[in-house]
Amino acid sequence: MIGLFSRLRVIIALMVIAALGITAAAFMIFTEREVTGSMLNRGDTEARNIMRVVMLNLTDHEADLEFFRQYARGRYEQHLRDLISVIVSQVDFFHDLCRKGALTEDQARRAALEAVQNARYGNNDYFFIYDRNSVAISHADPRIRGQDMSGARDVKGRPVARTMWNIVEKHRDGFLTLWWTRLEGQKPVPKLLYFCHYPEWDWLIGTGVYIDDIDRDVARKKTEILDVLTRTFHRVRVAETGYFSLFDGAGKILIHPSLESTDGSMLKDPVTGQNKIQELIAASSTPDVPLKYIWDKPDDPGNYQYTKFSHVEHFAPFNWYVSSSVYQDEMEKPAEKIIKRQAIFIGIVVVFSIVVVHLLLSRVTKPVARLTSHAALLQENDFALPEDRRQELLRIRFPGEISHLARTFWNMEKRLDEYLKNLQETTAAREKIESELRIARDIQMSMLPDHNTVLAGRTGVDLFAALEPAREVGGDLYDFFFIDEDHLCFIVGDVSDKGVPAALFMARGKALLRSAAQHQKTNPGFILEAANVELTEGNEMLMFITVFLGILNIRTGEMLFSNAAHVPPLILKEHGPWQPLELPMGKPLGIARGSAYETVRLQLQPEEVLLVFTDGVTEAEHQQKGFFGDERLLSLLGTLGHPTTASHCVEAVFREVKKFSEGAPQTDDIAVLCIRYTGTETKSRASRNSLSHG
């Protein structure tokens, strides 16, 4: 064993030396790559940050321009409102003269039209009046005056007169922007119209001003912005000679250290031969990804051998493209000094580490050999060594880690003995509990009635029910049985807890309800009262059951029912959608001894369906979607149409709830009972009686 650990010491020493050498080499290789990459990222990030500042600055300037544009337009709009107000007042003056009898209506109209026609303001701007037929009855342009303007359209093809009439019919007045020719002009320019309805004579009175001066002011301000950016770009440098440039969508270079005010569409990539401006425009679709290409430097023009990184962003409001240009070799220079210093430091560390490893190995391998020997003996003796052999582990003192490992080894052996004993006992107990729970589930499920047995030979009703506990056993219940030849009693309940306590309380409640039904016969309220009295006795755990109990006369379709705080069932009438059944008020069973329960009568027609369920259906939960809910249940039943069988309806509900939960653990018991009244029991009984007499 000693020879083994001598060889092991040599092997470990060689492995450590080899590992240190490989680690040092790998570290240098990866460090060079990482440092170089870090320097590149730093330069690239610096360019991106400056680019973001430029874009934010442009956004602020664009917001200022938009505010100026809106403010100028607002002034024009208010000016037009004031002018139209004056003209309307003048027309009102002539209308008042007509109303007072000083002028005939025809005279008043002509006077008003002539006054409006001659009115001028601003830069030879005028007013106009259209009648209901869109005839220009007053206009400063004699070519338009008296013409039918219903067919007149602006540059965009909009019918101007019809558009204005549509606006005033809805809002009484309004604005419209279009392109129109001045009185003495040749070229269409933007014009802002304001108009209103004059109801006394059913006229449309309007005026407009040309707003092309707003665009001129905006263009002047854009030029000022460009001047500010030019001064800024000429002062900014990334690394040593990196710079920023600006060009527009037409390829004109607006800002550049050496190509300013030139046509960039003539620039070609020296490697690919492609149009460089188009490549930069294409790169703007991914502004965070740099475009890499070969180019010259401002201090070395014409020498296309430098790798260049460029980020491009498009400022859509101005159709400008901002581009950063940073050279790779300039960003990598700081990395060279760092790598040289690292190489010297790593060499010193490797030599020192080799010496230290050699010294430590000689001290470590001895206690490791003792641990190895002890582990071999432990395996040979089936993990049961004498106490004196175990105590040898506590004598290992150096190194501290090996000493701690030896003490841990000793504790592990001690606990292993205890664990093996406890494991046998725990496994046997768990298997016993699981077996008992499986038996309890089988017993609980066997207590549920079989619809094929209960309804054997009955054709007046179609009934189906299903139960799915959240645990091995649960507290939901359903039951159905015939009290006499005509009356079918059916019950759905939900105990306030889950698991074994709820299952036991459920079994007791089910038995009491069935017993009370046999004595109280056809009065559901009395049945619930009798069962409630028994359930409150000795109910120290304060458990309770919500219950819906109904008794159906399968011959007449009359159903009597009562409710003990259960969720409302859903009913599908012969004509109409699924809807909640209105229930009488009632406390859960097992809470108050003297609780009273009202009995309600309901007449079922053939093919009408009743669905009774517990809150485990509507409270089925999905991690993202929330609860299943009443609306989703109603929607599901609506898609089924009029169910042909009760089982089809119940199975659809269980299937949809399971699909909604998407495999999530069931949190509550689920019970569903569907009863479909077919109305054929009278005929069925007659047939049975005929056979029996025969």
Image (cartoon, rainbow, N blue to C red):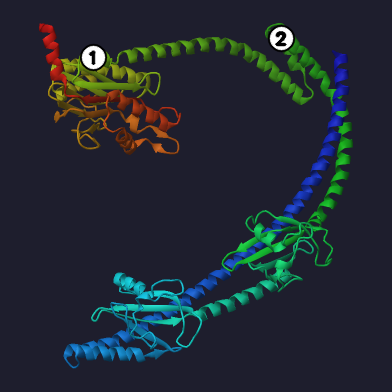
- In this rendered view, identify the residue nearer to me: 597 or 253: 253
Name the spot of residue 559 as percent of width and height, x first: 15, 26
Which mark, by number, is residue 379? 2
Mark 1, residue position: 454
Secondary structure of the residue carrying tag 1 is helix
Q: Residue furthest left?
A: 693
Q: Nearer the viewer, mark 2 or mark 1?
A: 1
Circle 2 crowding by C-alpha within 10 Å: few under 14, some 14–19, many from 20:
few
Q: Is residue 123 left or right of residue 612?
A: right
- The answer to whether 348 is drawn above or below residue 328 in the figure is above
Q: Residue at x 77, y 18 (%)?
A: 396
- The answer to whether 311 is drawn above or below residue 430 in the figure is below
Q: Residue at x 19, y 15 (%)?
A: 515
**Total marks drawn?**
2
Amino acid at pointer 1: Val
Q: Quadrant of the C terminus?
A: top left
The answer to whether marks 2 and 1 mark residues whose Cβ atoms lie closer than 8 Å is no
CA gap, disc 2 and disc 1: 66 Å
Q: In the picture, residue 669 is in which quadrant? A: top left
Amino acid at pointer 2: Gln
Q: Is residue 437 left or right of residue 461?
A: right
Q: Residue at x 20, y 36 (%)?
A: 575
Name the spot of residue 531 as percent of width and height, x first: 20, 20
Secondary structure of the residue carrying tag 2 is helix
Q: In the picture, residue 227 is in which quadrant? A: bottom right
For the question of whether residue 540 can be seen, the reply is: no
Q: In the picture, residue 205 is in which quadrant? A: bottom left
